[in-house]
Amino acid sequence: MEIYVHIPFCKRKCLYCDFNSYVNADGLIFGYLTALNREIALASDSFLKLEKNKKITSVFIGGGTPSLLPANCIEALIENVKNSFTVDDDAEITIEANPESLTEEKLAIYKRAGINRLSIGVQSLFDDNLKAIGRIHDAKTAQNAVALAKKYFDNISCDLMIGLPYDTKARVCEEVEKIAEAVDHLSVYQLILEEGTPLDLLVEEGKITLPADDEVADLMDAAVKTLRENGFSRYEVSNFARDGKISRHNLGYWTREEYLGFGAGASTFLKMSGQTPYDAEVRYSSANSIEKYVENVNGAEDYFDIPRENVEKLDDDAIVDERIMLGLRTAYGIEKKLLPISALEKYQRYFLIEGDKVRLTDEGFAIMNSVLVDVMQLK
Amino acid sequence: MGTERKTVSKKHIRNFSIIAHIDHGKSTLADRLIEKTGTVSERDMSEQLLDNMDIEKERGITIKLQTCRLYYKYKGEEYVLNLIDTPGHVDFTYEVSRSLAACEGALLVVDATQGVEAQTLSNVYLALENNLEILPVINKIDLASADVDAVKLEIEDIIGLDTEGCPLVSAKEGIGIDDLLGQIIDKLPAPSGDEDAPLKALIFDSFYDNYRGAISMVRLVDGRVKAGDQIKMMSTGKTFEVVEVGYFSPNMRAGKELTAGEVGYIAASIKNVSDTAVGDTITLALNPAKEALPGYKKATPMVYTGVFPADGARYEDLKEALLKLQLNDASLSFEPEVSTALGFGFRCGFLGLLHMEIIEERLEREFDLDLITTAPSVSYIVTKTNGEKIEIDNPTALPNPSEISSIEEPIVKALIFTPPEYVGAIMELCQGKRGIFVDMSYIDPTRVQITYRMPLNEIIYDFFDSLKSRTRGYASLDYEMDGFEKSDLVRLDMMINGDMCDALSIIVHKDNAYARGRGIAEKLKDAIPRQLFEIPIQATVGGKIIARETVKALRKDVLAKCYGGDITRKKKLLEKQKEGKKRMRKVGNVEVPSEAFISILKVDPTNN
């Protein structure tokens, strides 16, 4: 079982962001952390009762910007998780950090707290791109942060976005190479224009021009090629690692490991049919709003009394759909028998069949959704 | 129900219509007349009472004709004024002629800031054909840009009506309304007719009422009719018992009896609107009239289009909706049509483009239907090589070129009024649309009348929009049918990934085929989303490819980021994508969105 903890605070909202994060909400931090600890404690009570031996293999503190919080708060949080659950000795414990908020002092405390993996939001190594998407840091700050982090951690991942306004193939190769030189794990995400974000508006008004889809496809191809040349393997559609530095936590999502999500908007996935009040495999999330989340948690006496949103009980068809959707994201693919023979034939150009397994090629990863909507039942 | 009044003598009745160009204030004037005569209290007035439909109120036009009985005391005597509202648009000429036939007089409303327009003229001619007395009324005199003298001169020059002492009004401000009411009584003739002769009532409109069945709007020429009478429809011989007679004021009010010269309604529990055919004469079964009134020539559809439900499962709903609309709009015709791309739908015939737009809008709005319509077409007469003549209104029905000896297309006489500075642009436009110049004359130094003979096929394409954009909205257009002529026409087909899409076929002049084919191919290229394979789009004529575009294969369709394990959100995005795919039409193995079929109907006016 995995644990995800959401820290929904940011110093500034990036122009492309439609995720659950809040700026100028410092006044809520203390109350939020208190509720977070209460939710963890309530969960601990319930799950210790239910599954005494359930071991935690990974803890991920994501955001928002977790590195914005005082490091001792993070330390206390991890302490609380460790006291509440049976966390494996070799569990992967990751924190997300933004370059501008990383200090040597924080890094030292993270290490002391047992954190063993750092995920740094670099996004780009070009200042014009960083500025255009509203990042708070510049390229130099990002590179310095990575260098600093390396003094304390050997398992570091960087996030990189492609499809940014000033991206070119040469630039993407350059930044990928620089990052590959420094760290062993890289997530490459294509910029997605979410409706209603400031970036969406700027693009609509013609103030910012994003590369066309074909160009983005070319950029991704270039990034993948460069990473392979640098010894990385693509273990998931947007995740690359070298020397076994695959993220256990991320992979858990794709292999349908159970996880408990703590915090505003955090998602949980539980399989224990019969032991939860849901009587089925279930996914749900907490209220997005910080205030609402705090109110919900403080008002509950039992973990399963906390009001949840997007509750989705999974029937057999939905489980098959998920195995297809999630499994095809990975380099390990899925069991061939999950797909009808007609689908295997129709998309043979995008599939690699190895024994009783089938997975997507790089070309297939690029158009994955088109294949998925066709092969999944989706109700 | 209103208070019942005693029968009025004919000399105290005036039956009149208001004819005007759109926007010249006809409906506002009608409202003012209703208000001034106390028919509706000011408190109950909602703007433009006679325009019942939402679309009418929104667009400021009248589609269905309405009637209203007004009472007015003049020089110590009480008069009944029957106002019969008429639609102002060229498409509805047929409706206009129906209402005019029920009147002795007509008010010609002309906007003091605009002058006489093309459509005003055609309605005036209709009124003259019906031997109506026409009273010119100059409206909007309160506006700063009003030029009453110039407009008076125009009316005298173009139409030849005397404007000496004609009513000058502002319907909006209520100025001159009493004078107008007096002149209606003084200048328009009272109806003639014999109350004691056998009943002759002309049906000038009918509509369906859920409680009373099909109701006939009638003008009594001779005789009288009351509840309990057995009436006979002279065209069919069918008889019905009258349940109720009455008039509109402006809502339905039952009355004791209708007599010669009056306008009102007859309800007789008639189940089918087809039994109350417009133009038919109603008489009494016991004492029938010897011969029927002249009636009307039937309205013939001029524009045809395929109408399909965007959701194929709603075919039955579409059928129901069309049947319901047809109850009140006999000029709408339709028959089932099957398209390989769009499935089951209907081939609908309309009086014109506005009529088409309004029906489509009513289907979508009143019946909550999403529609896909194909490119409008006209009716062609095809002579086959074996001598057989067929009439087709659907491009897919066109025989093989080898079987065609000749094709004739409908021609119209187009009348355009414009300020002189746009004459060049309009002539260029008409020439480009295969127009043949007929005549041009100056109405006054600021206005020109241009006449062209043009194929209707070109008018229904994008002529009106182009005219408006080239003249910044200043030109007005009217057209009338002017026979059929042989023409060098071909069918332009569109192939998507090698498969012909029947819903996209159109009939065009050979010389225009290339430009149209290229235009449509370009539109389709933009409207069809990229798919996992390359999609050639070809325009062909008689199997020969004349234009080609390509939708490139999709290379990117992935949502990579997964925030904090939110799998549910990801699934929802995929579900949405699948929903979108479901709404698409299949042409061969290509998914074509509904918008693609609609996009080809819209032509960028700067393109031509």
Image: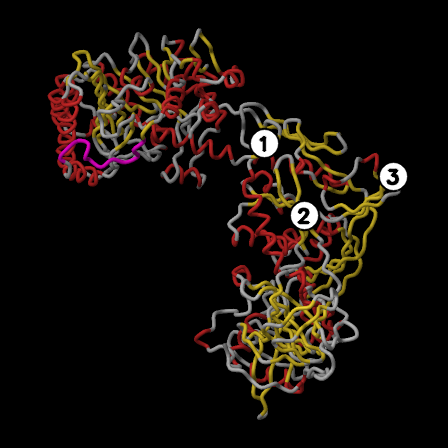
Magenta span has B263?
no
**Observer-nearest of A65 and A130:** A65
Query: Where's the C terminus of chain B, which quadrant?
Result: top right
Q: Secondary structure at mark 2?
A: strand
| Pointer 2 chain | B
Residue A72 position within the rendered picture, expressed as x and y whole percent measured from the top left:
11, 25
Residue type, label 2:
Glu
Report the residue at 35% width, 15% height from top. Answer: A240
Q: Secondary structure at mark 3?
A: loop
What residue would you read off at disc 3?
A: B385
Report the residue at 72% width, 49% height from top. Answer: B378
Q: Is residue B173 above or below residue A23?
A: below
Discs 1, 2 touching: Cβ within 8 Å: no
Discs 3, 2 touching: Cβ within 8 Å: no
What residue would you read off at disc 1?
A: B586
Report the residue at 56% width, 54% height from top. Answer: B362
Q: Is residue B22 above or below residue A112?
A: below
Residue B55 position within the rendered picture, expressed as x and y whole percent measured from the top left:
54, 59
Residue type, label 1:
Lys
Disc on the earlier residue, 3 or 2: 2
What residue would you read off at disc 2?
A: B335
Residue range in magenta is: A301-312
Residue A52 position within the rendered picture, expressed as x and y whole percent measured from the top left:
15, 18
Q: Secondary structure at mark 1?
A: strand
